[in-house]
Image: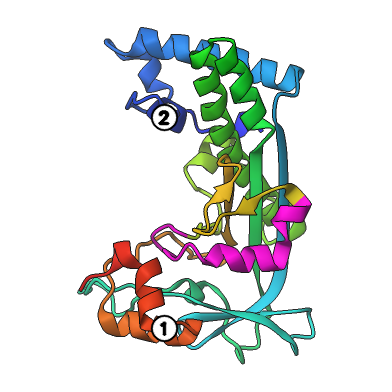
Amino acid sequence: LARYIDWSFFFMAWEMDGKYPEVLDHPEKGEEARILLRDARAMLARMGRERLVEARGVLGLLPAAAEEDDTVVVYRDEDRRETLLRIPFLLQQRRKTEVPYYLSLADYVAPAGSGLSDWIGFFAVTAGIGLEDVVRKFEAAGDDYGAIMVKVLSDRLAEAFAEYIHLLARRDHWGYAPDENLPVEDLLRVRYRGIRPAPGYPPCPDHRDKLLIWKLLEPDSRAGIRLTESCMMTPEASVSGYIFSHPEAKYFSVDKLARDQVEDYARRKGDTLAVAEKWLRPMLGY
């Protein structure tokens, strides 16, 4: 997984702004950046050699169809007769002048009745199995720098795992881009087809979407990744999300939500308005 690490985010975790590899030659930060990178690579080698942490993940691909403009229906099998669940998504809210449409993630799945057989992907990965024990050992030895380094690297490896499992989905398991052969630099710049938005982030800000992933994939029993009551993942060095294959799929933000949008979302989710507002509080525009 180490080859898929985005080192720019590694340096950001150390509060050292600047893109990699340019930061290595920065007139003020360059020397410190080179030392950090040297130490990180040494720790990565140690993590592999001594098996300090373990990476585990699960990927699922299921038949799906869009219902209206804001909901995805997930089916049990390719017969598409039995519905497993419905995933309500939110529509963009900011008023537009340049285009006549407002996106939701449901736009990236073929509509029911279109004659197209589409799919949706789900994944959950971690690079933090055993991390807590490793951190405790570093701290007990008085090596706070090592404890922080192994935590930061586990976070980066989890993100690298998400990159890698997305690659496997596109090229092998889903196979909608079987001939993809991009260098790692292009992968990190999202120059491939499709997206993998994560619950809690701008296109799908409700963290409870993780509950749907856990219902379908059982990452707790299959990969040792659990959810807290607030839908945070443990180990912390974990990533989960959806995979969409649409050739025009792109990341976006739903922006601040109007009350009517939240009321409609609550209805589709089976929530009271108060519950929906609780989970969407940072996005409320009223």
The amino acid marked with disc number 1 is Thr
Q: Is residue 284 left or right of residue 79?
A: left
Front-lying residue, 157 or 79? 157
> What is the spatial separation of the Cα atoms under label 2 and label 1, in whole angstroms?
38 Å
Which image quadrant for residue 217? bottom right
**SS under mark 1:** loop
Residue 17 higher or lower than 225, as above or below: above
Residue 193 higher or lower than 18, as above or below: below
Does the magenta run of residues contain 212? Answer: yes
Residue that appears at 38% across and 30% down = 12
Front-lying residue, 109 or 274? 274
Which range is magenta? 200-222
Residue labelled with disc 1: 272
Instruction: Give the class, few, some or many, for how many residues have Cα within 10 Å of label 1's Cα (few <14, many ≥20).
Output: few
Residue that appears at 47% across and 71% down = 105
Which image quadrant for residue 194? bottom right
- Position of residue 87 measured from the top left corner of the image (x, y, whole percent): 55, 77
Front-lying residue, 160 or 184? 160
- Position of residue 192 measured from the top left corner of the image (x, y, whole percent): 55, 51
Residue labelled with disc 2: 13
Residue at the farthest front position? 140
- Position of residue 43 measured from the top left corner of the image (x, y, whole percent): 61, 16
Instruction: Give the class, few, some or many, for how many residues have Cα within 10 Å of label 2's Cα (few <14, many ≥20).
Output: some
Front-lying residue, 151 or 201? 151
Which quarter shows the C terminus?
A: bottom left
Which image quadrant for residue 126? top right
Q: Are marks 2 and 1 in contact (CB under 8 Å)?
A: no
Give the image's coloring scheme. rainbow
The amino acid marked with disc number 2 is Ala
Of marks 2 and 1, which one's residue comes earlier in the chain?
2
The mark lying in front, picked from 2 and 1, is: 1
Does the magenta run of residues contain 217? Answer: yes
